Image (cartoon, rainbow, N blue to C red):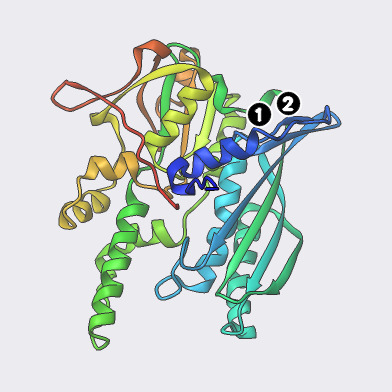
Amino acid sequence: MSKERTEISEIGEFGLIEHLNENIKLKNSSSLKGIGDDAAVIASGDHVKVVTTDLLLEGVHFDLSYAPLTHVGFKAVAVNISDVAAMNAVPKQITVSVALSNRFSVEAVDALYAGINAAAEHYGVDVVGGDTTASRSGLLISVTAIGEALPEQVVYRSGAKLNDIVCVTGDLGGALVGLQILEREKQVFLSNPDMKPELEKYQIVTARQLRPEARMDIIHEFRELGLVPTSMMDISDGLASELFHICKASKVGVTIYEDKLPIDKQTYDTAVELGLDPITCVLNGGEDYELLFTIDQKDFNKIEKHPDIHFIGHVTKEEEGKYLVTKSGTAAQLKAQGWKHF
Ligand SMILES: [Mg+2]
């Protein structure tokens, strides 16, 4: 008798999450939102807690031949804080679990924790627990972040409405381009160890890859401006893929404009140097950890002049689909290629 076997790569990371979620039913009334957003939402007295967790594996998510341990520690925290930010919540606590092989010394662990503690300081969170264990193959870090918000402040992926304005913070594509440079220089070094990696002129993009920032500054500004986006998520898998998530959750379509997409000059120049299309890097590059959100048109004047928020398009009806209007004025269907781990 032949037993059926389905490869994880056939359904992909998001397909796997959906598949696992099919058998999960929420039992407690305090579980306001389970799997399917940037973080879970849990009722807690007059406010809510948001909870999110991420697992980073050596060789999959980071390469210690070019990623300093201190940066790995910082990034492990920042990517979780970014998911708290994506819910429009303020992070308060983290737990940190690590698995280490005997390749790592106490000094190496100290370097990792220097980054973890620097991020905890930077984002104002307390390290309240975790676990350490042995690993047979390299380093594994799992961080869980807990944040707080008032119930009316929480922003889900599902709230985008027709005619809302689509916004992104910062610039996009840098982390992917930075990764390509680090990989290229690694290969150069491996084939000729006497060659010193040439990284000076790529500092912005390599920093975007090695030590990303969660945009908590934007969340605090939203509070000051009295602005609550209608939907939001952080950009970890690429703008196009995240737009698909918001459209699916909100049952809407979207039109974005190529000439509105924010790209840093170094990202653009480096992409061209690498033979990559800069716009493809912006749409499909992962790990930028900027925020993608939609706002009601009545809120536009609150952030109209913000130097670091870009208005890239608008929300349409679901049946109108998802489109990118190119610089030449033609509408091309958006494709979510995203970032594949499987
Ligand atoms: Mg996220």
Instruction: Please tell me whether residue 40 is drawn above or below residue 76 in the rendered image.
Output: above
| Secondary structure at numbered mark 1 | loop
Q: Nearer the viewer, residue 209 or 136?
A: 136
**Residue at (66, 68) in percent of width and height:** 98
Q: Amino acid at mark 1?
A: Val
Quadrant housing residue 197? bottom left
Q: Is residue 141 above or below residue 310?
A: below
Tell me the kind of residue under disc 2. Pro
Q: Residue furthest right?
A: 45
Q: Where's residue 87, x and y in %?
A: 61, 34
Q: Position of residue 124 (x, y in %)?
A: 67, 53
Left or right: 76 in relation to 270: right
Residue 223 percent coordinates (x, y): 62, 31
Frontmost residue, 247 versus 303: 247
Task: Kindly tell me whether residue 197 is visible in this rendering.
Answer: yes
Question: Which residue has dot 2 on it?
Answer: 151
Which element carries disc 2, helix, strand or loop? helix
The quadrant of the rendered image in which ligand 1 is seen is: top right
Which residue is rendered at x = 44% and y = 34% of the image? 242
194, above or below 130, in the image: below
Quadrant assignment, res 142: bottom right
Of 300 and 76, the residue lying toward us: 76
Q: Which mark is residue 303?
A: none
Residue at the extreme bottom: 194
Q: Which residue is mark 1?
A: 154
> Are the residues tagged 1 and 2 within 8 Å (C-beta)?
yes
Name the residue: 67% across, 41% down.
90
**Residue 5 position within the rendered picture, expressed as x and y whole percent measured from the top left:** 51, 47
Residue drawn at 83 percent across, 27 percent down: 29
Give the class, few, some or many, for how many residues have Cα within 10 Å of label 2's Cα (few <14, many ≥20): some
